[in-house]
Amino acid sequence: MELIHSQGNDYVISVKANQKTLYQQLQDLAQRDTVFSIHLDAEQTRDRQTTRIAAVFPLPDSLKHLWSGAQQGVEVIRLGKRQGEPYYERRYYITSWSQQADALQARIRSHWGIENPLHWVKDVVLGEDQSSIAAKPAATLMAFIRNLVITLFRRAGHHSITAAIDRFSNDLNQLLPMLDFPSG
């Protein structure tokens, strides 16, 4: 954070439940009466109904000293229905921006536009988080292969990596031209 902030940049960092102390601190801060900005929006897409509530609250000096440039915390609650099933998510963030909840919620959502097409595919479709490979050279090679697979399929016009894997997994002659290798 020091490098980011010292170069005049800002950040929004997701705090996950495995960061137990910080996560609990943010959770406690969000429940106090010090929230100074709230934004609510709702949308309906094909099979999803979503309501988002973003609440912005100040950080105490003790947290500001640990996170260079940190100004405030953000709690984002998402709830609604996906394919007819209810869901509820609560996430916490630390940010160096001094913006209102609507602007911060927009920044957080735009990050998911980057996160979902790559990391979600690597984690969920290609099973990266479930990998048991522990040796760094092998893990690095597999990460490279996953990135290559995603890049090749997307460059070939396949938006669904799952569908592309299903289509090409048993047909090397169709897959090789994507690598500019002659087939047959």
Image (tube, grey):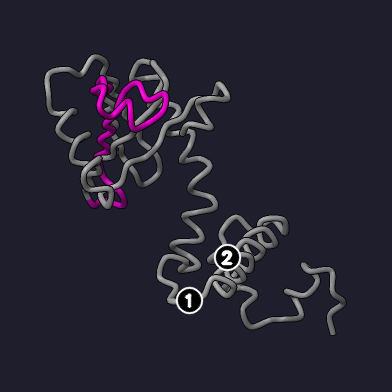
Secondary structure of the residue carrying tag 1 is loop
Q: How many numbered marks does the figure carry?
A: 2
Under tag 2, what secondary structure? helix
Residue at 58% across, 67% down: 140
Query: Which quadrant of the figure has residue 149?
Result: bottom right
> Which residue is under mark 2?
143
Q: Residue at x 62, y 71 (%)?
A: 141
Residue 37, relative to residue 77: is it above or below?
Answer: above
Amino acid carrying label 1: it is Ile
Residue 169, horizontal then vertical, whole percent: 61, 78
Residue 25 location, quadrant: top left
Residue 15 sits above or below residue 175 on the image:
above
Q: Quadrant of residue 44 in the image?
A: top left
Please say if 88 is above or below 4.
below
Q: Which residues are magenta?
A: 56-85
Disc 1 target residue: 133
Question: Split into 4 quadrants, where in the image is the C terminus?
Answer: bottom right
Q: Label 2 is placed on what type of residue?
A: Ala
